[in-house]
Amino acid sequence: MRVLSGIQPTGNLHLGNYLGAIRNWVAMQDEMPAADTASAGKDADSRCFFFLADMHSITVHESREQRLANVRDMAAALVACGIDPDRSVLFNQARVPAHAELCWLLCGTARIGWMNRMTQFKDKAGKNRDSASVGLYVYPVLMAADVLLYQATHVPVGEDQKQHLELTRDIAIKFNTDFGVELFTLPDPIIPRQTARIMSLRDGTAKMSKSDPSDMSRINLTDDTDTIVQKVRKAKTDPEPLPGEAAGLAGRPEAQNLVGIYATLANSTPDAVCAQFAGQGFGAFKPALGDLLAETLAPIRTRFLALRDDHAALDALLDKGAQQAAAAAEPTLRAAYDAIGLMR
Ligand code: TRP
């Protein structure tokens, strides 16, 4: 089992980032067999690889300073949330040139017709497709390279990345067939069954977002306990009490969001949370949610704030991760050049 996933480094990290991808990564890491030095070689095979997709981030306009800060922030957040650089390989893509190299090789295999079907490109490019960057178009090929370089078997991603994983499999099959090799492993997406969609605290129909002008709409990883409790207290709700089961939340997006957050944090289900608070109003539920959030996020905040500004520590950590990643990627990259007949 070889787990691999990437995340685009964004700034202003919030609860949505944590409960969306990061928490799933930590769970997958923690399920891996504990490292045992006696069989280090074998353990290296079943390690998790987590990386910051900073090479993908060139498809988004950002200043140089912001881009650098985003990678540091996201790396610090991952560690603060529980990614252990001694157990998992944590790195940023730009430090491992094999990603860009394999991407180019796979550009010879991926077909324009396949790329034209990518719905995320269509969404992101919008109406004016001619002015979208070529990078945005090739984005899924770089993602295929990310996955195939490490012979990943399991790739935890959100529902929106499923099509990119299918493309990755198509590219792997075509490369293997065209060059008569059994080089690339076909990866399976791991899509969390019940993805908690974390919505804005001000509008239950909009995703919690770093770019919402109202800071009250989100819980930031940097928020202290008082701020968290206050944001939850002021969160938009409705006057109805909580129903006995989750089905009763239909048509109540704000209530649904708060129950969903509680359930995710408590490793429970919306049905169980409703059963627990059935008949009570938000006057009772909000303090419970605020406490649970504050309690969960306090240790994360402390670690995050300390590490975020420790550039030397972050640099050392990412450097070690990049060396491990480059070593793991090397045999596959070499075999890909060789299969094509390129002298390297
Ligand atoms: N495209 C992914 C996203 O936006 C991030 C990503 C890049 C990724 N490369 C990857 C995810 C490889 C999984 C595997 O969420």
Image (spheres, rainbow, N blue to C red):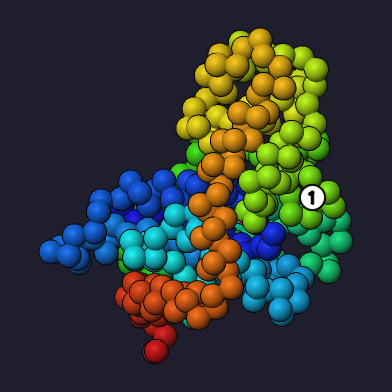
Q: Kindly identify the residue that appears in the image at 53 percent across and 43 percent down.
A: 296
> Against 197, is 72 above or below?
below
Q: Kindly identify the residue that appears in the image at 62 percent across and 12 percent down.
A: 278
Amino acid marked by disc 1 = Asp
Residue 162 visible, this angle: no
Q: Secondary structure at mark 1?
A: helix
> Against 129, is 15 above or below?
above
Q: Position of residue 204 (x, y in %)?
A: 76, 33
Q: Position of residue 209 (x, y in %)?
A: 74, 49
Q: Position of residue 329 (x, y in %)?
A: 38, 73
Hey, which residue is sitting farthest front in the picture? 226
Which quarter of the figure has residue 327? bottom left
Q: Which residue is mark 1?
A: 215
Which quarter of the figure has residue 174? bottom left
Which quarter of the figure has residue 35? bottom left
Callout 1 crowding tier (Cα within 10 Å): few <14, some 14–19, many ≥20: some
Q: Kindly identify the residue that appears in the image at 66 percent across and 62 percent down.
A: 10
Q: Position of residue 339 (x, y in %)?
A: 36, 76
Q: Quadrant of the C terminus?
A: bottom left
> Against 131, is 281 above or below?
above
Q: In terms of depth relative to the viewer, which is nearer, 294 or 132?
A: 294
Q: Kindly identify the residue that appears in the image at 15 percent across and 62 percent down.
A: 39
Ligand 1 rendered quadrant: bottom right
Q: In terms of depth relative to the viewer, which is nearer, 78 or 330?
A: 78
Q: In terms of depth relative to the viewer, which is nearer, 186 or 320?
A: 320
Hey, which residue is sitting farthest left in the picture? 38
Left or right of residue 43, residue 193 in this image? right
